[in-house]
Image (tube, grey):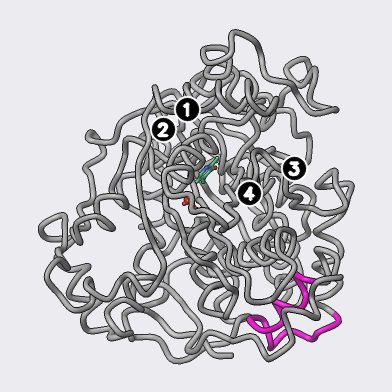
Amino acid sequence: MRYVSTRGGMAPATFSDILLGGLAPDGGLTLPEDYPTLTPGELASWRELSYPELAFAILRKFADDLPAEDLRTLIDKTYTVEAFHTEDITPVKTLLDGVGLLELSNGPTLAFKDIALQLLGNLFEYALLKTGGHLNILGATSGDTGSSAEYAMRGKHGIRVFMLSPHQKMSRFQTAQMFSLQDPNIFNIAVHGVFDDCQDMVKAVSHDAEFKARYAIGTVNSINWARVAAQIVYYFKGWLAVTEHDDQEVSFAVPSGNFGNICAGYIAKRMGLPIRRLILATNENNVLDEFFRTGVYRVRKPDQVAHTSSPSMDISKASNFERFIYDVVGRDPAVVRELWRQVDDYGFFDLSGTDAFRNIQQFGFISGSSNHPNRMAIIRRVYQECGVMIDTHTADGLKVGLEYREEGVPLLCLETALPAKFEESITEALGRLPERPTGYENIEELPQRFEVMDAEVDQIKHYIVRHAG
Ligand SMILES: *Cc1c(COP(=O)(O)O)cnc(C)c1O
């Protein structure tokens, strides 16, 4: 399998070549030259597989340049009962007749990003051990991504993580989750400022090409291809869990922000998984819903992004969207370049009235959005009717999913986080605190390890110079 860039300026590369990278050298995103497709009978032969076996069967199609036994070892080491607290890794929980939750949040940080990042940690370590290199991961977080990245990279050879977060602005639970890590390769930096200050510091360091190269600065952002690939697996797992015959269709409702999760579902469908609808759900930040309804992709300015009670979906632009648009415009990199030039210059592009947009139905997407009252209502309803607590992001997905539910077609809503992470919203909806999984009861009491810093680029640079691998 060879990988190309959506902007057409990268020589075809292998999985290993693009593994550690973010953007392609030409500023585009990487994708397989052709999607692998299922062979006749292959899906049926996967029914009895465990999660790691299924992950291996799927990922070897994408990572075909890694020795098969190495890939199998990395996958077996990742998807364990110890890390995910369940043999199935991503079990399905039935809510109503024909409606289920695909549980993706049983990993160490109680959010779906663990599924991809836990594998990424092992893949990165493996790649660095092979080349003898090292990597200093620099990131900014307002909560979710940072903790997922830290739990993926803790204790990994050749990797150090420098994670900036706004001082005293994360929830107590999130702060405790990150700052209680005692691994010497994890550096938590609490910045006097807001999330945007943290992100600006990361950008400033990344734009200093000499510093970046000298200290092997890397990132773990959501455009990394391996993350998308790892997420394809649970669409198959969910489909296999609720079907008996190989031509049965299933619809998936996906709480969406950067279009990473649902992009994986789209690729599963292209591989031949019988997915009927990919139901994209946004919160009040409805950039993607607007596109699927109107054909206009309009990014927001940072001050136009609403701070909502499903904060991990508060995005101004959807960083993985370019992968899908590349296919929509017939894989023509010149068109993609032109569309993103328009985004840079005018803040939007408009595909309404084009053949590309008229034909978009064939890709199976449908969209809707949700808001704070919708979330509260659905959290209450699911708790009262099914005795199940769901978090605010999953609530956005389920709200939109139920609107498009079809008779006779199983609907799986992706559970992207556990309610324990969002105590305030759950208390507002239900008048009680969410349950916490075993082991997280007293997380706030654990000793914390972090550094406080002003929002100044020189300070973080000096810190990296002193602590880099
Ligand atoms: C990241 C995240 C999302 C959005 O996923 P994308 O891949 O960015 O679309 C939704 N819910 C939760 C809880 C998340 O952490």
Most distant residue in the front direction: 407
- Assign a secondary structure to mark 3: loop
Q: Is residue 213 visible?
A: no
Q: Nearer the viewer, mark 1 or mark 4?
A: 4
- The residues tagged by marks 1 and 2 sit, at their Cα atoms, a distance apart of 5 Å
Q: Residue at x 68, y 43 (%)?
A: 105
Q: Residues at badges 1 and 2 in contact (C-beta under 8 Å)? A: yes
Q: Amino acid at mark 1?
A: Pro
Instruction: Choose the circle earlier in sequence order: 3 or 4.
Output: 4
43, above or below 387, in the image:
below
Instruction: Choose the circle earlier in sequence order: 4 or 2.
Output: 4
Instruction: Choose the circle earlier in sequence order: 2 or 3.
Output: 3
**Is residue 119 a member of the stretch shown in magenta?**
no
Q: Nearer the viewer, residue 176 or 6?
A: 6
Q: Residues at badges 2 and 3 in contact (C-beta under 8 Å)? A: no
Residue range of the region highlighted in magenta in the rendering:
54-69
Q: Which residue is mark 2?
A: 195
